[in-house]
Image (cartoon, rainbow, N blue to C red):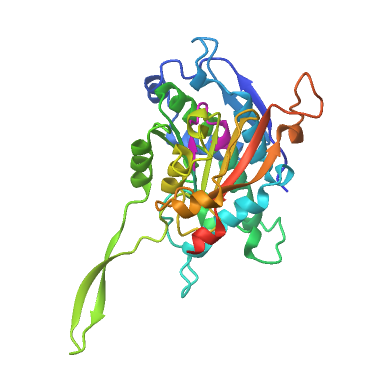
Amino acid sequence: DYEEDNILVNNNGAADNGYNSITKNHPSRKQRKQQHYENRNKHILHIEQDGYLRSYNPSTVLWPSGYLLSLCLSSPAKCGIQTELLDAISFLNDEQTDRKTKNAKDTKGPIAVELGAGVGAPSVSLARWIVSRINDVTHNTTQHDDNSGIISPHLSSSLLVVATDKSPHALALSITNAYNNGVGENIAVLQSNHSDLESMIQLKDSFFEPISTSIAVKEDEGEISNSTEQAKKIEGFAIVIGSSLPDLFHDSSIGTNLLWKTLDKLLDPKNPNAIAILAHNAETSIETPPPSVLQETKDGHSSFECFKQISGLVYGMRTIYKQDHSDFLISLCRRRKAAHEN
């Protein structure tokens, strides 16, 4: 299994001037590629955040819940979510391979999206873990009895994760941290507001627009005519991640809550294993809508459930008052199986 990352946080204001400083001081493509391949297999995560050249800002520092999520995504086996991650990605293995020729196709969009990314540590952790799995398969360092634990090698050069935030300074730090940790080619940043549903719809449409293709159809008379149909197979993200998103958790027991609406828009409806991995304060609970609400709600937003929780105790994040209690949790949510099948 992939070795757990050590996370080192530096307060040196690397992105003090937001996008302008990143663009002005951006290394050449050759330098970036060299750094990309030198760093992608290292087990230390170098994270830049504000605090030295510019005062602390909520969106440009690594908060405890983000730290926990980063640790979990760096070592999913230890965290207890590796099976769920691989199941979610396995759908892409099937969709991105031509079943007749067995040749890899170009991906139709990124695998995951992070909401409220801040400095982007969870995005970087997830991208590094995916790349490490691909490298294991490519170099035959991991044995699998079947395809359940394999991530297709053709995904290695693809866009894997989209880091989103409404703060330009946060996005500058996210892309800086991506390149500093060897996954700059696998992460994109996009300004987006997770508390605005319309912004979330625009986010998905930016990467998963319908693709029209002309298909020859034989008529009864033997003539050939062209018809257009939607050929899009991937209709959303396989994985949604986020930390410290209280705006989404308010009144989560209601089927029309913003959290469920957001997940309904972002997660691929065709992927039966698409999941959301959310880190949050233990006092901020995510309540699954009851079955009665599911039956009464026609829009389907209440067809989600949170099926697993991981305590921060897994990584030694204990409260100062109780050694057997953590202030932070990770919740895994997905569409209810019955609802997905219907």
Q: Position of residue 120 (x, y in %)?
A: 53, 31
Residue 62 visible in the shown view? yes
Q: In the displayed structure, would residue 247 be above or below residue 214? A: above
Drawn side of residue 82 relative to residue 272, left or right:
right
User: In the image, is 37 to the left or to the right of 267?
Assistant: right
For the record, the magenta segment spans: 113-124
Q: Residue at x 71, y 55 (%)?
A: 141
Residue shown at 41%/47% (left/top)?
A: 265
Q: Is residue 187 above or below residue 15?
A: below
Q: Position of residue 168 (x, y in %)?
A: 40, 24
Q: Nearer the viewer, residue 215 or 183?
A: 215
Q: Furthest-bottom residue in view?
A: 221
109 and 22: which is toward the camera: 109
Residue 28 location (% of width, % of height): 43, 31
Q: Residue at x 59, y 23 (%)?
A: 63
Q: Is residue 172 magenta?
A: no
The answer to whether residue 151 shows anywhere in this view is no
Q: Is residue 23 above or below residue 17?
A: below
- Residue 331, horizontal then vertical, whole percent: 62, 40
Residue at (45% x, 52% y) in the render: 296
**Which is nearer the eye, 292 or 307?**
292
